[in-house]
Amino acid sequence: MSTVQQIHDVPVLICPAEGETIGCANDVLDLIGDAMYQDARWVVIPAGRFDEGFFRLRTRIAGEIIQKFVNYRVGIAVIGDISRHTEDSSALRDFVRECNRGRQTWFLADTEEFHERLKG
């Protein structure tokens, strides 16, 4: 069950590690809807919830999922160790680096890093 927490006065929907696998853009619509209903500005999703295809950019799954969040103006933070994916793909490494430069999509190691980034 996802819960909303106030982190630095920002409402954040925190998704549990266990739950449905996220494998396509439609799989995040309920999360986005839940976030919007609860006025959350960010959704934090453990990396383990994503299907392997999310981390292969040629599938376009990551782009489609992130685009849903952008369209609804809700931030997404993917939390967890994705090094096995980034070690195998320079394109994914570049994608993650570019995302982390922005204010909409972050790939972070843990929730502490998310707290720090959100602080500003």
Image (spheres, rainbow, N blue to C red):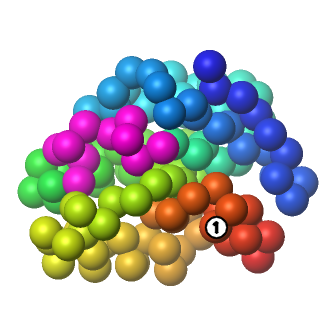
Please state the horizontal and vertical placement of residue 110, each as a whole percent of the image. 57, 59
Q: Amino acid at mark 1?
A: Glu
**Image: magenta residue range:** 46-55
Please tell me which residue lies in front, 71 or 15: 15
Q: Is residue 39 above or below residue 103?
A: above
User: In the image, 118: left or right of 28?
Assistant: right
User: In the image, 32: left or right of 27?
Assistant: right
At 29% across and 51% down in the image, what residue appears? 62
Please state the horizontal and vertical placement of residue 108, each as a whole percent of the image. 51, 64
The secondary structure that dominates the magenta segment is: helix
Residue ID for mark 1: 113
At 27% across and 75% down in the image, what residue appears? 93
Q: Is residue 10 above or below residue 33?
A: below
The N terminus lies in quadrant: top right
The C terminus lies in quadrant: bottom right
Instruction: Answer yes or no: is residue 91 visible.
Output: no
Q: Quadrant of residue 92?
A: bottom left
Please state the horizontal and vertical placement of residue 47, each as a whole percent of the image. 41, 47
Mark 1 secondary-structure assignment: helix
User: In the image, 50: left or right of 13?
Assistant: left
Q: Quadrant of residue 97?
A: bottom left
How packed is label 1: few (under 14 Cα within 10 Å), some, or many (20 or more)? few
Please tell me which residue lies in front, 48 or 61: 48
